[in-house]
Amino acid sequence: MGSELGQYLKHSFVTTWAIAACFVAFNYPLPTLAAEVSACPPPEPKISSRVLPLYPSESQRRDQAGTTMLEITVAPDGRPTGYVVTRSSGSTRLDYAASTTVMSHYLWEKSPDGCPAARRPISIVWQLGNPPRPDGMILVPLSSYPPDALQLEELGDTYLTLSLGDGGSIKDIRVAYSSGYPELDNKSVAIAKSSPELTTGKTAGAFTLLFRWQLTAELNRNRETITTRAMHWADALRSMRGQ
């Protein structure tokens, strides 16, 4: 039994090399088991087509903000032909404004001949007002990224206002300006709570920390992120009154 198996393996090995030699001798390309992935690369966005979605006035009045995550079906000629809301901002109005803007204006570069339609993820971040001036900034390392946020390639800036007591002890923390992603905001709060050294020795009172969530170019090559910002209704009212 052992000798028969050995003869079979030896015969299979010799046959495989003989076939390969024939392909080389007659200048035929060796067969591949899978098509080359590089033949149909993901379509690149046409930057000139990127416009900021208009912030719905009713959403401004209701203090609605967040991030709409979309998956766009892109035809070979670069036109969007369909979409799916993969994650809602929490406001149907904002999600609708995001999807209609993308479907009406956004374009991608044409794909090589023979390539099928592609699916491209895009995030529209809705923010109200302007962020406060930070007293300090933290570049959050990838090791601190929430796993789900890293997988979805979320990025942005979270501003926290810390209420400090004597010696810089943290009495209270609130999100003063959101990144647009609850996971990143919540993780920023958790980091601040577990890192008393960030404020040790600081004067009692309000202290604003900026947590910058950013991805390397390699990790951020897939998801496109567009941030649209509107004036907060209270700021707009003060502006109208000349205050």
Image (tube, rainbow, N blue to C red):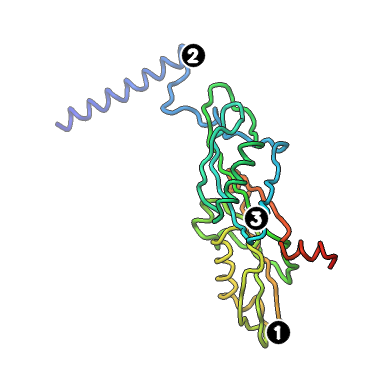
Inspect the image, locate mark 3, and give the three-letter code of the amino acid beneath it: Glu
Q: Foreground: 111 or 56? A: 56
Extreme-right residue of the structure: 242
Inspect the image, locate mark 1, and give the three-letter code of the amino acid beneath it: Ala
x and y, in percent, of residue 203 in the image: 73, 83
Is label 3 in a helix, a strand or a loop? helix
Q: Residue beneath label 3, please?
A: 58
Extreme-bottom residue of the structure: 166
Q: Is residue 216 above or below residue 101?
A: below
Q: Gap between marks 2 and 3, in whole Å?
A: 68 Å
Which of discs 2 and 3 lies nearer the camera? The answer is 3
The answer to whether 161 appears left or right of 190 in the picture is right
Q: Gap between marks 1 and 2, in whole Å?
A: 78 Å
The answer to whether 113 appears left or right of 234 in the picture is left
x and y, in percent, of residue 141 in the image: 60, 61
Q: Residue at x 62, y 81 (%)?
A: 170
Q: Residue at x 14, y 31 (%)?
A: 1
Q: Residue beneath label 2, please?
A: 27
Q: Residue beneath label 1, please?
A: 204
